[in-house]
Image: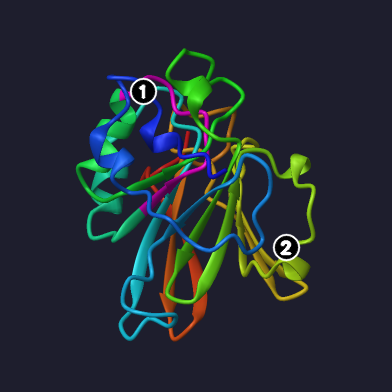
Amino acid sequence: MRKDPQSAGSAAFPAAVRRASSPAAPRARRPGDSRQDAGATGPLSRSPILIGVISDTHGLLRPEALAALRGSRYIIHAGDVGPPQILEKLSAIAPVTIVRGNIDKAAWARKLPETQVLEAGGVSIYVLHDLMQLDLKPEAAGFGVVISGHSHAPKQEVRNGVLYFNPGSAGPQRFKLPVTLGRLIVEDGKVRSELVNLLATDH
């Protein structure tokens, strides 16, 4: 049975996030996965789809992050959210795909899935918080992108035809790591990524 975290019965859970979910085919499903379909106009996008990718906010959603996410058609949050107000603010911009991070232990957050699948313009995107917990071969399962967070270190690389993308942390700065988020641009069934540094000068 399909588990829909967006309908988890918590008044604190943002309504706009609940509305982001829609039924989809069971391809490449795993226990606990929730699938969302962003490709409403067909299997391939005829115009670019901009997806904002953010992670590890830890209760801090900077104005710079909100500004960088504006214009996104969809937003992915790769976990370690903090309070639900973070998702309320994000969902005011675009529908949100969210997974649970290791600090997300409040009652409402425990209802979030550990993994999500987002379909966008013919590209399948697998989302989890900690890449070390990936227990499938994305290329064999048909995924073009794997999104993760947790490390606070931004990274983007292609392996075996799969884009592995970590947007870094957009929340409190850790050590000398940058404060970043990311973007995916899906067009003609292909995807490219970019990182956005939210602070003019890291210190």
Scheme of colours in the image: rainbow
* Callout 1 secondary element: loop
Q: Which residue is under mark 2?
A: 138
Of 22 and 76, which appears nearest the observer?
22
In the rendered structure, does residue 113 fall within the stretch colored magenta?
no
Q: Position of residue 115 (x, y in %)?
A: 60, 43
Residue 125 against residue 187 in the figure, above or below: above
Q: Position of residue 167 (x, y in %)?
A: 52, 49
Residue drawn at (35%, 71%) of the image: 49
Question: Reading the chain from its start, which is encountered first: label 2 or label 1?
Answer: 1
Q: Which residues are magenta?
A: 75-84
Q: Which residue is under mark 1?
A: 9
Residue 47 against residue 80 in the figure, above or below: below
Q: Is residue 61 left or right of residue 79?
A: left
Question: Does any portion of residue 65 appear in the rendered image?
Answer: yes
Q: Position of residue 30 (x, y in %)?
A: 68, 49
**Which quadrant: the N terminus?**
top right
Of 92 and 38, which appears nearest the observer?
38
Query: Overall secondary structure of the magenta stretch?
Result: loop
C-alpha distance separating marks 2 and 1: 31 Å
Residue drawn at (36%, 26%) of the image: 60
Q: Position of residue 15 (x, y in %)?
A: 24, 34
Q: How many marks?
A: 2
Residue drawn at (50%, 67%) of the image: 193
Q: Quadrant of residue 157?
A: bottom right
Q: Is residue 38 left or right of residue 88?
A: right
Question: Does any portion of residue 63 appear in the rendered image?
Answer: no
Of 120 and 2, which appears nearest the observer?
2
